[in-house]
Structure formats: C-alpha cells, structure tokens
Amino acid sequence: MRVVHLTGKDYFGAGRAAYRLHKGLQRAGVDSLMLVGDKHSDDPSVINVQSGFFNKIRKKILIKLEKRFIKRGCNNLNGMLSTGIHGFSIAKTVNSYHPDIIHLHWINRGYMKLSDILKFEAPVVVTMHDVWYFTGICHYAKNCQSYTRECGNCVQIGSKDPTDVCTYIQTLKQEIYKKKAIDFIAPSRWMQTEALQSHLLKNQKVHHLSNGIDISVFSYNKSARRRLGLPMEKNLVLFAAVDATSDENKGFDLLSQAIDQLDENRFELIVIGGSKEDQFPGKTINIHNIGYVGDDALLIDYLSAADVIVVPSKQENLSNLIMEGLSCSKPVVAFGIGGNGDMIRHKENGYLAVPFDTKDLAKGIEWSVESEERTIRLSQNARQQVELNFRIGDVSKRHIECYSRIIEEQND
C-alpha cells in the first residue's frame, strides 16, 4: 500500500502530527511519502514539491491575492482565514507517485487548490486538524455557529452580506465534496461531533482516529532542569505554541491573567514559541522567554524540566503539546474545551479549568503541584494515558485498517 500525505509543512502543529503518522506508517511496513511545500527535515521520504526561488515568490503572491480576495467588501479580518482557491495545482505531481491513498492534512497558505481533489486518481482521506474543511473560510470558528447552516454575514470578516465570500467558498466546498468521495478523519471526539453537525459534512463519512506520538522518544529526562540551568527550587510552568504570544487563539492573554494570581516566590513561567523580543511589562513572576524551539530533544528537555504544562487555548482539536507533555509524565492544565478531554482526565492526570475562567486556570496550576504525593500520581497517570491511547504504532494500525476499508469499498 502506498500512501501519499499532502501538507504544507513537515513541522509545526498539523505538520508535526502528519509527520508522526507518516513515520509510524513506514515502521508498520507501509510505503508512505509526504509531499510538502516547506521542508525542514532531512528525511528523503519527505519531498518538497515547491522548492526553488520562483515557487517561493509565487506562493507569497498567492497568499497576498487570497488576503485581497477575502478583504473585498469586508470591514475587518479576524484570525486565520483561507479560501482554498489561491494555491498551487499539484494534482499531476501527486498522481505521478501512483498512490493507493491520498491523505490530505493542512493544505492552506498557498500550498494547494482544494479543487485538485477532483483531479486525484486515488481515494482521498482528509484529516481535519482544525475546522476549516467544514466552515466557509475560518480555521477557528470561535463562538460562531454559522457552519451548521449556510454561511453568510460572516462575523470573522465583519460582513453584513448574506452572500459574502464565506458563502461562496462554502458552496465551492460543497460541490467538491459531492463530486468526489472523501473520507474525513477527526482526531478528537469533539471534532467529529462538530463536523457531523456542520452543513458541509453532516452527510459525509467522518471517522474518529486520533493523532499519535512516539513514546520511545517523548519521555521524561530527569537531568533536564539542571542541564538547562533552570531554578531547582521553583515550580516551573511551561507554555508553548507556534506564535505563542501573538496568536489570539493560543490564549496567552488568559494565561497572563492567571499567572498574576500565582505566588512569584513559588512559580516561574517558561514561554516557548513566541518572539525572543517579547517583553512582559508589569509581570512580577519571572518569565523565561525561550523563543522558537525546533529540536525535539530540546523541547523534551524543557517539558521534563517543567512541573506542569499549561495549554490556555480558546479552541483546540487534539493538542500536540498536551500529548507531548503527558508523554513526558507531566500533568497538563487546560480549559475544558474541544478535544482536551480526550487526553486530560480531570484531577487524574491534569486539570480541566472552567472555560475561560483565569482564576480556575490558576487554581489548576497550583493544585497540580500542591503535594509530592499528588505530583507522583499525576505524572504516572499522564504517561499511562498516552501509553494506552496514543502510541504511534497503535494509531498507525488504526489508520491502515481505515485505508484498507476505503480501498476495498472503492474497488467493489
């Protein structure tokens, strides 16, 4: 069986999850390839199909055109928005690899046109790393429920037009989904529920298959804190995300309020993924601003050095950081939203705070480190949760079973 994964990058959120599945499939004996538009790894099975100076320029132009297209007739842009029409046409390249399954992940920011799906010769599987595949143009729906019906009057762009760009893109997606049989994968139970309630996917096949992690790599390193030169006597709280302090959805504004309620003599904060230039005026708690960490070994060290991981996101599907933290035997504190409950068992391996109560978030952080006995129990349960449910080997087997059923159905 040959599986070709399509995703914009082989790093960051969706790219990391896709790459882990890709490697898990290879270890299970599957002929798996990954076609990306931006490659960071030196893995020969990850192929950059958009390398070169002119392709980089073309992608920048496509992204600018997309922003202009969305802006027409709108009062404001709010959050990550994508059309699926401003991208490379890669169908011919994909078909040249003669895949048995084409597995789409995160394909926006100029990577590919969604309409290429209609040109693919093999069955198509789509993993929904956010809600974009069943909304008009948004990746984070926030409080909007328009995707459960026909879009229009989009609050994300300040539109008062019932036939705005969101309606246009939603209709385009609907036509593509009607013409090509697609199996959708929801990594979390929350995502599956939302997808099946949506206007676009309520009559589609939506499977629940989680992401996975290599627990032989992500595990606790007891010497990490001393090696990193972090204080031994403090309780260290770790927050990490892509664009950690600038992406509104990551919830740093809520975390900032929560840490103001912590004892500065007991707690310190580690921030990974923001700008090294970030300043934190008015904060009495000591903050270690690490910047971007692109190396798994170094990330594991920081996860191991922390006492508790905090994920204050306003919308989450199946957070890589939660899975990574639990795998490194660390309790995780997050809001009780989205797919967080798939991994965090409240007061068993972490704490699910009331959305979006910063006092309860701070309470969860304090509760997680209240006693040595509790810390040991939480740490053991954290690792066990990943071992039982998110081993990449087990996750890969479930995906192979799904692929096999789809291929068999297509051949009947």
Image: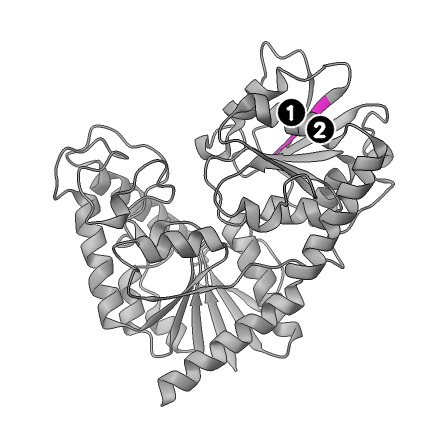
Q: Quadrant of residue 153?
A: top left
Other residues around mark 1 within 10 Å, as few (<14) / some (14–19) / many (≥20):
some
Up the image or down, 386 lies above or below 325; here it is: below
Up the image or down, 6 lies above or below 278; here it is: below
Which residue is under mark 2? Answer: 367
Q: Residue at x 50, y 52 (%)?
A: 14
Q: Main secondary structure of the magenta part?
A: strand
Do we see residue 262 in this rendering? Answer: yes
Is 245 in front, or is 378?
378
Q: Are marks 1 and 2 in contact (CB under 8 Å)?
A: yes
Q: 46 left or right of 117?
A: right
Query: Is residue 271 covered in magenta?
Result: yes
Residue 383 position, x and y percent, is: 74, 51
Query: Is residue 412 covered in magenta?
Result: no
Residue range of the region highlighted in magenta in the rendering: 268-273
Q: Residue at x 68, y 44 (%)?
A: 325
Q: Quadrant of residue 227?
A: top right
Do we see residue 270 in this rendering? Answer: no
